[in-house]
Amino acid sequence: MRWRRLWVALLLLPSLGGCSGIQTSLGGDGADGASFIRLFTIFLVVCGIMYLLVVAALAVAIGRRRDGGRRALTVDNGSHHESSPLVRSALVGWGALIAVGLIALTIASFFTDRSAAARARHSSFAVKIIANQWWWDVIYTTPDSSKIVHTANELHLPVGVEAEVELQSNDVIHSFWVPNLAGKQDLIPGRTTDIQLLPTRTGLYRAQCAEFCGTQHANMALVVTVESKADFLNWIAQQRRPAFAPASRLELAGYRYVTTRECSSCHNITGTPAGGQIGPDLTHLASRRTLAAGTLPMNRGNLYGWVADPQSQKPGSQMPTIGLAPNDLHAVVAYLERLK
Amino acid sequence: MSRPPKRPAAEKPQIVRDGPDLTGPELADRLDATWARPRGLIGWLATVDHKEIGIRYIVTALAFLALGGLMALHMRLQLMFPDSQWLGAGAFNETFTMHGTTMMFLFAVPVMQGVQIYLAPIMVGTRAMAFPRLTAFSYYMYLFGGLFLWTAHFLHFGPDNGWFSYVPLAGPQYGIGKRADVWAQTVTFTEIAGLAVAVTLVVTILKQRAPGMTLARMPIFVWATLVTSLMVIFSMPSVALVSGMLLSDRLVGTQFFNPVEHGDPLLWQHLFWFFGHPEVYIIFLPATGFVSEIVSTFSRRAIFGYPVVVLSLVSTGILAFGLWVHHMFATGLPRVGYSFYTAASMAVSIPTGLQIFCWIATIWEGRPRLQVPMLYVIGFIITFVIGGLSGVIIAAVPLDLQLHDTYFIVAHFHYVLIGGAVFPLLGAITYWYPKFTGRMMSERLGRIGFWTIFLGFQLAFFPMHFAGLMGMPRRVYTYPAGMGLELPNMLSSIGSAVVAVAVLMFVVNMLASLRAGVAAGPDPWDAPSLEWAVASPPPHYNFAHIPAVESRTPLWDAKDGLPVVHGLRVDERELILTSVISAAPDLREPSAVPSIWPFISAVAVAVTFICSVFSPWALAFGAVPAAAALIAWFWPKTPGANPEPQIT
């Protein structure tokens, strides 16, 4: 364990400037993430040895020319088609070494892959993620439809529990990737794919779309919160509640605007007349950590900026700039902040 | 070859053949008159000389390299800092699309084919390509395709979906405007050009080798050319087909890729990568051919393990067709099937590893001279092996699922393509420059240039391995601060500027040496293969007498000058055809004279293709002028005043 941490730290050395490790393949915060580090280390050692052999042989081969060239088989002594038996047997040895190394690596890769696939049969709860240009729709499905939790651009997982994530796409091909926890899985229109996540450490991680999906591919992130089972159950319970009612005159004005004007044609807020199904669910918007799929941190200033002009914050985004009057803007932001 | 008996028709002018009675300056003058092209613009456009066409390919491809390189610098400026505003999302996506499309379709493949067009006929000892007009046609198709793409880019309707143009993003529903159509039609242009060149190269190599040059005596570069040309013939139809399907989805509403109508987006990926993976070897294998030639010449010995190197080339060419799924490990295909592609991907490193052994063994047993081409070979081995080994890493499914579509992959394939193909290419240009121009490139500037590009490259691309491991996906126009990505991106941006300076130095060296270089003579490096037996630059007809070959290193082994074959016509363009395996003299064959029709045909086809982006009817209307031009091109020739006598 300790040596692994050490070399991971060494690998990350070039990134001295404040590495927070929330989005890294070397995090090892999930079962697949840990097996990645193990297998990667094996490959790195084997490949490193092969590389050193090649470079050393090259250096010696070039350096040898200094010894007068008596042993050289060149045009000048008429023996340029011959080859020494030593080098010929070295060729056979080198070929065998490559073959053995590759077989070993292939077997290591195969068993890592098998063990991941075998573990996947034991997942205990299901999440459905639907990718859109450029945000993530997240649905905690249960047989009881009144208990379904609908959120967007954030995923909460209990630590130590295998989650089965069902993946679909509404438009183009995307790829779901939480590097700290596991590898990638594409989301392909017309198909349902899946990935299993087994987080082993609590923490905040960042996931990001990994297949080019258009203009705002770079700003299609997802915050993954891995927490204790109790915290997770609390969160689920809080998410199941309908939206809070407006508590002030300003919030009420915002509520009226959101539920009767442009906003509600795309966005859903459970417990209100706003029932759009095109954009992210806003029921508990203010409880999330980011806005617009990880584009901006959640705070009042960014809410103002986003609602006033999404196109300057995330150019090409599907949310239009509608040009709210200042009074409406204040009201809408006040109401959105209420949606804890 | 024996002379055929003459017919009694005495009033006809004599058929003139080369031979002991006709040699030296008189033969040269007559051959020159027969093989020279007409002067003037028409003559320039009508040329069928493989050397002229090869040089045009190389120069055009280098111009596209410069454009693609500018795109790369643009991207590195944008990514130099987190949350940068230099380019913005839309422009960045256009930029990386143009970079990838240009480098793959307009630089890497055409530049390799250009060198092959120039060198392969001389290296096998013949006077012209097998189908010289088709070669000319291919160049114009390539040029028009490249101009079309870049014109569209400058007019702001260039492609922006990546060089791989995945559907449905590039399909009719999400790929709005004409951007994806431009991409698909550019691919059609370059595929036609690439296929045409491949066919002519295969025929030239198999049928026009000098007598005595058996398959087992062919220079390694010619073997590499043969293997890559066959790969082109088997792989490019796949992408031509799939880009055609994309166009018809977009233009006439077919539903090949639409899942709602029982199409399949993954069909695109299978067909694209069935071409796309061999494509990498189509770029890389000619480069290994350069390396084999350079290593042999500068170590002053024949390549070690010739059969091993040849079989490595052939087996790499075959294995390349069984790997394409490793680009699709994240799509969720059945996992057991993946294991096959992992094993196949790793297996490629066996032939490649053996080739590397053979190069090092050649140096080991010879006496290396460290001139600039050899420096590039050494830089190639040191750099390319890193890319090859990182390729082994990403062949493993569990590792690839993390590293796929991250900057680790960007690092990997630039190590393979720049380290593995561009370094040998720069070495090869330095090596054959005296043959192309008659003058040497500056050794001093060449050395400075080599070290600049070698070190600049490592600075630009080595940190990308870390950026990828630290979670930076590809094709993102920006990345947030505080994730540890600042330093590797800054280093990469600085390195890319150093690489740009080095490329500039190389170009300056090329241009300056054109006038100021030392005169080279036919064989400045004391090299073994046939291209060094002719003057630098070679005459239009390449060889005054076709040489007869008795070993793999003819110029080293024939101490008293090459033995030659007599009896080819001097008053008409004529070639000698030999048998496929043993290169026994077989037939004399006329070779096409210059013609403007390949150019006119290319114009007609180009207009058709470009208009078809806007209306499917263009294919119907454009077929008429294209057919007319092709008919004129292939119009049967009436026998000349002096037809070939029958052998009775």
Image (spheres, coloured by chain):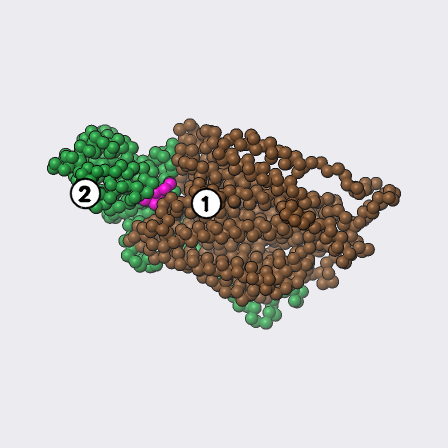
Chain colours: A green, B brown
Q: Is residue B427 above or below residue B324?
A: below
> Can you see residue A237?
no
Percent of width and height locating residue B581:
68, 47
Callout 2 amino acid: Asp
| Residue occupying the far front of the picture | B40
Subunit bearing disc 1: B
Q: How crowded is mark 1: few (under 14 residues within 10 Å), some or many (20 or more)?
A: few
Q: Does the magenta stretch include residue A312?
A: no
Quick check: B592 left or right of B508? right
Image quadrant assignment for residue B329: top left
Front one among B444 and B330: B444
Which quarter of the figure is the N terminus of chain A placed in?
Answer: bottom left
| Residue occupying the far left of the picture | A248
| Residue occupying the far bottom of the picture | A68
* Total residue callouts: 2
> Can you see residue B571?
yes
Front one among A118 and B188: B188
The structure residue drawn at horizontal position 38% and vertical position 32%, both measured from the top left corner, is A190
Quick check: A178 left or right of B271? left
Percent of width and height locating residue B340:
46, 42
Front one among B492 and A253: A253
Residue on which disc 1 sits: B154
Query: Which element carries disc 2, helix, strand or loop?
Result: helix
Which quarter of the figure is the C terminus of chain A placed in?
Answer: top left
Q: Give the range drawn in magenta.
A: A214-222
| Residue occupying the far top of the picture | B261
Q: How many angstroms separate mark 1 from mark 2 (CA)?
A: 55 Å
